[in-house]
Image (tube, rainbow, N blue to C red):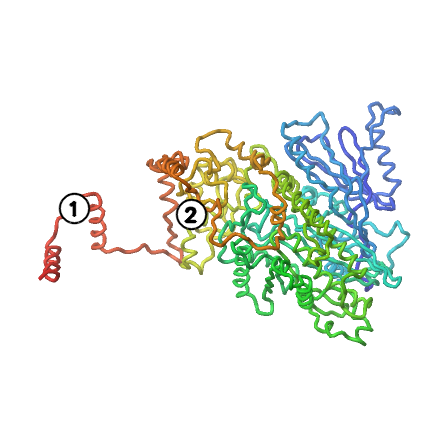
Amino acid sequence: MPAAAAAPIIRCVQKLVLYETRARYFLVGSNHAETKYRVLKIDRTEPTDLVIIDDKHVYTQQEVRELLGRLDLGNRTKIGQKGSSGLSRAVSAFGVVGFVKFLEGYYIVLITKRRKMADIGGHAIYKIEDTNMIYIPNDTVRITHPDEARYLRIFQNVDLSSNFYFSYSYDLSHSLQYNLTILRMPLEILKTETIQTRQESFDIFEDEGLTAQGGSGVFGVCSEPYKKYVWNGQLLDVVKNTVHHDWLLYVIHGFCGQSKLLIYGRPVHVTLIARRSSKFAGTRFLKRGANSEGDVANEVETEQILCDASVMSFSAGSYSSYVQVRGSVPLYWSQDISTMIPKPPITLDQADPFAHIAALHFDQMLQRFGSPIIILNLVKEREKRKHERILSEELVGAVTYLNQFLPPEHAIVYIPWDMAKYTKSKLCNVLDRLNVIAESVVKKTGFFVNRPDSYCSILRPDEKWNELGGFVVPTGRLQTGVLRTNCVDCLDRTNTAQFMVGKCALAYQLYSLGLIDKPNLQFDTDAVRLFEELYEDHGDTLSLQYGGSQLVHRVKTYRKIAPWTQHSKDIMQTLSRYYSNAFSDADRQDSINLFLGVFQPAEGKPHLWELPTDFYLHHKNTMSLSQTRRSYTYWWTQGVLNHLPLPYDEVTCTENRRKLIVKKFHKYEEEIDIHNEFFRPYELSSFDDTFCLAMTNSIRDFMPKNVGIDPSPFTVRKPDETGKSVVGNKNNREETVLQRKTAASAPPPPSEEAASSSSEDDSGTDKEDEGAVSQHSTPVKMTDTSDNVKITENIVQSMKDIYGINLSDVPSEDDLTIYTRIHISSFSQDNIYEVQPPKVDKKSIDIFHAHIQAGRGTMQPLIKEDILMYREYIRNRYM
């Protein structure tokens, strides 16, 4: 590394002690050697606000002792009294997770226990083992709220001691390729790209007696984290601009494991890091597909890092990495679990003819990884009755549409492969086929290595090595593009496919470091066995986080060498996943929404447990945008205004104003007033992310709970088929929440046969005939004469009994006014796209009026032309 390549800094303090008085908390942080200190002063007299003072000064150990002594002396009840301490030590910690507020004052979350999980280039990666949550305001100023304790329990339901990781000097939110690229950048560029307060930071190697000489040491670089994979970003935002960046400790969620290989006595570390996305995060059936911003459910970035442990230095050591991604199919789709069946039907919630959501998702991937983006789609392609195939058909259509707008060399590569079908076949080897796919993928994307090709590979080049893609630089190789693997749940099949791709990449990584002579690795070797165990731990952890159980099908299952006891274990894991999805996922989803700041409690808003759905929390501005664009949907679909962007691209809803502030197309002021008038009857308290929940009734309340029933509002239903009683009972909302939370009417667990089919890796095809109709496929099932009588009785029910409103009543004047204003669209005269009303001649108008009068029973007298026309008709017809 050049002498001016990097400066010695540390991102965070490593040891903390929290001292308290009645008026303040004093958080004292130091480096590991306890030679340099920083102090935060937190006010405890504010009941609701967070007041933090950071003097940005670096103290020595002696200065901190003197400061604490003065504070202790000054806060004693009586001056000079030694029996009572004015400054008490509250807790010791290793980092600050963040600050959070519910309905009372702020809490501070501290890491009290940690465990070292891995070491990358001398940078330790820790797992959070225990945390402590401390309420900041003192008891004299505390304003109590009856729901505060419930929010606290929900927040603490996110177990921070379960698979949350951090590092003081290594950016876990970025890949090794990104971090080492930053280290190799010249200092002049680093000053503009990273935080510039290096001279105030701590030397991370000071406790080892090492010093930086001419900038030749390798130290942590304080780059901006990638917020998508940071889970405490919302908790730190409140103090981000107030405190020094040394206090900001960013935490990721996922998996981290490291294993050691000995190659003829040469130590090699294999590290696996999985970063779970904090966007659209949640549990299995409650988070499917993508949200309106292109973030998908269960999105995890997996990076495997290989390093020569004999030299633990980024500048002198040998490092290699490979990154791949998993995530739900980027479409608007879901599975309704209200029917409580092990395998709920897949439903496409919204039409997306222009692949807008998929475009947003792949745009994010292109910005982060470059091209090519390779999609390995493992869902079923052939089914007698459509289930998973629905997703395949939509995804291939979206990719085909998007590739029209990409240059051929940067097009999205789509690889469909029905893994379940190949698993069922006795003639096909699943892993052999996956190995072929893995070879082609690694050749396209390449991998990262921080050193040039070894001399032995230059003397004896391998033919596969010469075909390797990526980007070759003088200092090594860069990975360009990424593999994106998905099935339905992105758990079992996806983990096996990622293992095979990782195994192929591992062979290239070992070959690039000169550790093997051919870029090939065989099964049943120690290296592959160790790598397989690492990936199985990785898969079990991610499966527990998203699905509620460990993997059901493992690599040994697809190799067909699993022991006979594995089948019973798979059934138990399926049952565990079933019960977790049925009974605990809703509570876990609420905890995740509260922890990530997706839902923020406030006075006057519905409580988190009162929301019937969190759809509008994860889909920003969905309600307002859809209502605003409604009057233009017809023109958009007909292609009349395809040359125009939609009138409202971005809408901001404020707390105290009902006026929609439109950032683009300000000239449509009349349209804004129309939509303000439309929203006013609902008496919304505020335009926030959950403003739609203030409506008393929704059409979805009267729709059937069972997915198979026709959702049309014009279908006659039995009373027990509606999701809400038509009688205006006040307890309906509470009953809906109760059903969502407890699922008390859940049927008994599935049998072994049903449990095996409920897993997301069901290798068989549906055995039902293609023409067979499910019991939920029609709204009314006709069996015998008695049933017909009941059906007749349901048909003659009044509209109010069925729909909750009487459609035959004359609408009120307000409704008619709103309807007229919404459905009349007029552009201003200065618009270049002026719309001319249609011109109708007088003859057509007279014919129309005559038709209306005839419908009312009033016949118009015949005129001379009509008589002559009638005579001409009789003459030609009968004479």
The tag earlier along the polypeptide, 1 or 2, is 2
Is residue 282 in view?
Answer: no
The answer to whether 452 appears left or right of 840 in the picture is right
* Vertical arrangement, residue 852 with respect to residue 321, above or below: above
- 793 or 209: nearer the viewer: 793
Mark 1 neighbour class, 10 Å CA radius: few under 14, some 14 to 19, many 20 or more: few
Residue 434: image quadrant is bottom right
Q: Which residue is mark 1?
A: 859
The residue located at (20%, 46%) in the rendering is 854
Please report the residue visible at 69 percent of the width from the left and 47 percent of the height from the top.
568
Tag 2: residue type? Glu
Instruction: List x then y, in percent, for residue 436.
Output: 67, 66
Where does the C terminus fall, quadrant-wise? bottom left
Question: How many marks can you see?
Answer: 2
Q: Is residue 440 visible?
A: yes
Amino acid on which disc 1 is placed:
Met
Residue 602: x percent and y percent? 60, 35
Where is 659 relative to 426, above or below? above
Left or right: 76, with 821 as reference point: right
Question: Can you identify the residue that label 2 sits on?
Answer: 671
